[in-house]
Amino acid sequence: MPPFLSIVVPAYNEERRLPATLQAILHFLAAQPFDAEIIIADDGSTDRTGQLVEQLMQEQRNLHLLKLDHRGKGFAVRAGALAAQGTYVLLCDADLAVPIEEWHKLQPYCMEGYQVVIGSREGLGAQRLGEPRYRHFMGRVFNAVVRLVALGGIQDTQCGFKAFHHEASQHIFRSVQLYGADAKLVQGAAVTAFDVEALFLARKFGYRIKEIPVLWRYGVETKVDPLRDSLRNFGDVLRVRWNDLRGRYPSLHTAASETLPK
């Protein structure tokens, strides 16, 4: 039987933060009434990230490691999501900026039939801890562009805490174009707007989306470069709209009938 929940954690050079994150997730899962698996999608790390996971895998049978070429976070998330076997697939960041316990806020809506349930740092009940004001301002400007160009009605596309029903996850991540199977090798951390494309496809395919306010902590070791990554993200949003205008995204029926790419 497949597990109830798959937790996908993309990681790039996370030997310092990942051990504490994995311990927190394992501790959380030990108290749950459902089966789960953890998938670490190692985005070509050059430090001991992979070795640390392999050591822990000797004790934890529900922990898995995907060793990937360094093609960026979007590529790693896609690989992890497509490898997931759980009825529900939860994406979370390697620093657990959103605590794993926030799953309890998303789970009821998954069970109610929403195929995509996303954590949000906006809205009544959301908490943003330790975030510099300039970063908050930049985020709101970016989201205004996203709503104007691609995704009206969603307050926060970039929070890394997102849950998908397995079928929806497979359809969406098979169909992404920006950081799909042919994504190019990159140098350094590559923060992208892959989330926008995934949510754009979710809406295009007619999946029900629910946005839930969550607790989020700003990471002092963030890999985000404000200027470089902002420019890349704005470009990604425009590419999503351009891809759609050119008919590069399949219909739900076509996506569902395709076989998994390599």
Image (cartoon, helix red, strand yellow):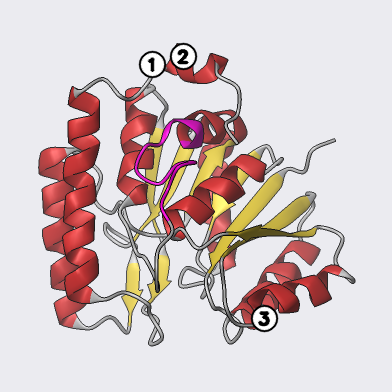
Q: Position of residue 116 (x, y in %)?
A: 46, 38
Name which residue lies at 46% across and 14% down.
254
Q: Position of residue 84 (x, y in %)?
A: 67, 44
Type of amino acid under label 1: Ser
Q: CA distance from mark 2 to mark 1?
A: 5 Å
What is the span of residues highlighted in magenta in the rendered image? 173-184
Which residue corresponds to mark 2?
A: 254
Q: Are marks 3 and 2 in contact (CB under 8 Å)?
A: no
Type of amino acid under label 2: Thr
The first of marks 3 and 1 along the sequence is 3
Q: Nearer the viewer, residue 9 or 159?
A: 9
Q: For residue 121, which quarter of the picture? A: bottom left
Which residue corresponds to mark 3?
A: 19
Q: Nearer the viewer, residue 10 or 32?
A: 10
Q: Is residue 252 magenta?
A: no
Name which residue lies at 22% across and 59% down.
232
User: Residue 251 shows which numbered tag?
Assistant: 1
Q: Nearer the viewer, residue 164 or 94?
A: 94
For mark 1, give the secondary structure: loop
